[in-house]
Amino acid sequence: MLNVVAAVIHNPQDQILIAQRPVHKHQGGLWEFAGGKIDDGETAAQALVRELQEELGIIATQYRPLLTVEHHYSDKSVRLQIFRVTAFDGKAHGAEGQPTLWVNLQDLKNYPFPAANTPIIKAAVLPDVYYITPEPHEVGGDLLVWLQVRVQAGMWLVLRAKSLSKSDYLTLAQQVAALCQQRQATLLLHGHIDLLDSVPTTIGVHLPFALASIETKIDTKNKYLVISTHNGEELEQAWQWGADFVTLSPVQQTLSHPEQAAMGWQNFATLVQQAKLPVYALGGMTQQDITQAQQLGAQGVAGIRGLFNGSR
């Protein structure tokens, strides 16, 4: 197994830096995220700083783990440890003569990457906040009306309505999908993998861990797969099932699940450091918790009441 480090590097305009592989190398001519082999005796973070200085002439000053990817080509196996770099000293350029480009997030899909980079591209565009809708009865029964004054451009939203029948959920999902498309927001379904084709504008599905565990084959049709997790064993299993990211809860006590003991930030941090995929802190989260969650290694925060209404 070849151990490699790679970086998703952001500039102040929130563009991502990509570089083109030399034609004579493995997967030559394709685009990639900067990085390289982890040398003997190096940590992944040390390799990250060294490789970016050698390849791009920059010194990474702010970075955090994003995810770990293992991929098996016909001629080799690669384990990629990915970091998100949000600040650096110097001007990035192809220090080894390789072409480089700053690319808008939505345009990454237009460039050919090695197959191992697919989950990195998915993770690169994730937001800081992942919104989960309340149940329809919690907002007076008309969730669509409730969302019409809250859905904004750039928002990632999962439609959680467990109290509805499948047919009623589908009707609501199609209506919410139209609203999200109009507002330039992103929608994921909750629980209903079999409805992905019926709501074509949705980008994926969020599964409770219990539901994911009984699926004989999780097929999200190349869309995002999100899984709810609550401990280290579930984090590892979600990665094995091919989840693109997870929620980890409850970090703090919540009104929706008062019977569940909160893990606290210290335990959350320990679990995030063990995770191999992007993690969102869930449970009692507000917008004010984003920075702390990210400092502990999370992608950001997820929630219902606290994020929409500003309270736990």
Image (cartoon, rainbow, N blue to C red):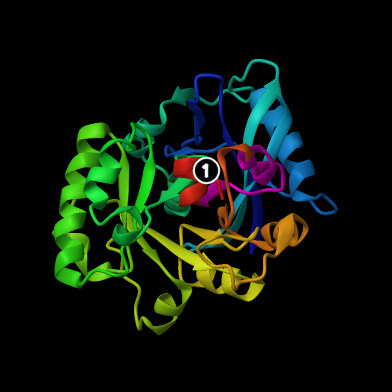
**Residue 290's image quarter?**
top right
Say which quadrant the N terminus sits in.
Answer: bottom right
- Viewer can see residue 199: no
* Closer to the camera in the image, 123 or 142: 142
Q: How many marks?
A: 1
Image: 241 above or below 292: below
In the picture shown, does residue 170 fall above or below 88? below
Q: Residue at x 49, y 52 (%)?
A: 303
Q: Is residue 296 covered in magenta? A: yes
Residue 214, percent from left and from top: 39, 84
Q: Residue furthest top?
A: 91
In percent of the image, x 75 and y 60: which residue is there? 270
Q: Give the side of residue 229 with respect to residue 166, left or right.
A: right
In this rendering, does residue 66 appear at all?
yes
- Amino acid residing under circle 1: Lys
Q: Residues within 10 Å of mark 1 (few under 14, many from 20)?
A: few
**Element type where label 1 sits in the image:** loop
Residue farthest along the front direction in this orientation: 140
At 28% across and 68% down in the image, what residue appears? 193
State yes or no: residue 72 in magenta: no
Residue 207: percent from left, percent from top: 40, 68
Q: Quadrant of residue 70?
A: bottom right
Q: Residue 99, relative to residue 225: is it above or below?
A: above
Q: Nearer the viewer, residue 124 or 75?
A: 124
In the image, is residue 264 above or below residue 209?
above
Query: Magenta residues?
Result: 289-302
In this figure, which residue is indicated by the disc labeled 1? 25
Residue 105, horizontal then vertical, whole percent? 41, 32
- Residue at 61% x, 43% y: name it: 6
Give the camera-side residue of 97 and 35: 35
